[in-house]
Image (cartoon, rainbow, N blue to C red):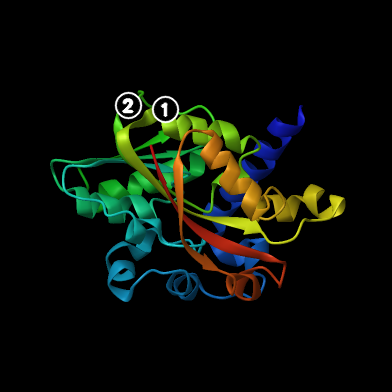
């Protein structure tokens, strides 16, 4: 197994267990046992949002990209690494009956959970597809808005992820993401630590390198926010932050 495939296996296995264990309490970024709802509030979800879609909250993520994205009725929205569907449910409320939301995740257990939640809650404008964000099962020039929440850092080839996002977006389309980026480089041992890889740290890039990769895919990048306090709350003081980005095609 090559290194990229090994990383993907580590991530898939970890998030399959996260679904089965009920959320973030089982993950390395949450050893302090903060409950899922408190984590969600800390990273930008409102009480109102959690009341309507809290069933899909596993205490994962590092921001609320839907709150940044200016999604409107009729939009076609794509969520990269959709997990149990929290952000997709919120986006589906905004796009209405004339819009559509697609969630992509490579973990079968996440797709199953998200699909069940969406069906149980009666969403007709939302679907989940099993797939790799480095090779999206989505037509070119078909998406108005791409969102992603603390997922690109898990992908071995981030340039390919942003290249795919650029491909599927319509001209003038936008991408909004929250992601973990490093403020200082990690040691070799940290880079190879499976818990850190699965916990959104081991595969993260330095902030400037991350932004350059997005720009290299063709996007115009605007930094919307930086949350450095998340390091203390969820990542045991590792020098990192949650970066909020708008990227326009």
The relative height of residue 154 versus residue 164 in the rendered view (above or below) is below
Which residue is found at the position 50% from the left and 38% from the top?
108
Q: Nearer the viewer, residue 120 or 179?
A: 179
What numbered label is drawn on residue 141?
Answer: 2
**Residue 44 horizontal/vertical position (percent):** 41, 69
Q: Earlier in the sequence, mark 2 or mark 1?
A: 2
**Residue 164 horizontal/vertical position (percent):** 47, 30
Q: Are marks 2 and 1 in contact (CB under 8 Å)?
A: yes
The relative height of residue 89 versus residue 12 in the rendered view (above or below) is below
Is 28 on the left-hand or right-hand side of 41? right
Residue 249 visible (yes or no) = yes
Is 218 on the left-hand or right-hand side of 202? left
**Residue 121 horizontal/vertical position (percent):** 24, 53
The residue that disc 1 covers is 167
Which residue is found at the position 39% from the left and 58% from the top?
56
Residue 122 visible (yes or no) = no
**Residue 61 horizontal/vertical position (percent):** 50, 59
The relative height of residue 3 versus residue 56 in the rendered view (above or below) is above
Quarter of the image for the N terminus: give it: top right
Quarter of the image for the C terminus: give it: top left
């Amino acid at each position: 197994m090559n290194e990229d495939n090994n990383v993907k296996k580590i991530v898939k296995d970890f998030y399959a267990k996260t679904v089965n264990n009920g959320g973030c309490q089982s993950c390395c970024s949450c050893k302090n046992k903060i409950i899922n709802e408190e984590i969600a509030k800390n990273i930008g979800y409102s009480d109102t949002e959690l009341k309507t879609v809290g069933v899909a909250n596993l205490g994962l993520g590092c921001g609320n990209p839907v709150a940044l994205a200016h999604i409107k009725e009729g939009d076609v929205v794509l969520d990269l690494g959709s997990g149990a569907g929290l952000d997709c449910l919120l986006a589906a409320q905004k796009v209405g009956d004339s819009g559509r939301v697609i969630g992509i995740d490579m973990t079968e257990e996440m797709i199953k959970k998200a699909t069940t939640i969406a069906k149980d809650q009666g969403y007709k404008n939302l679907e989940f597809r099993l797939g790799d964000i480095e090779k999206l099962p989505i037509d070119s020039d078909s998406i108005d808005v791409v969102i992603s929440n603390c997922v690109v850092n898990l992908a071995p080839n981030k340039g390919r992820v942003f290249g795919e996002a650029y491909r599927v977006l319509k001209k003038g389309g936008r991408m909004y993401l929250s992601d973990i980026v490093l403020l200082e480089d990690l040691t070799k041992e940290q880079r190879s630590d499976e818990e850190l890889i699965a916990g959104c740290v081991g595969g993260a890039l330095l902030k400037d390198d991350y932004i350059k990769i997005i720009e290299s895919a063709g996007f115009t990048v605007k930094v919307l926010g930086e949350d450095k306090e998340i390091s203390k709350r969820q990542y045991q003081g590792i020098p990192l932050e949650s970066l909020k980005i708008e990227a326009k095609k």
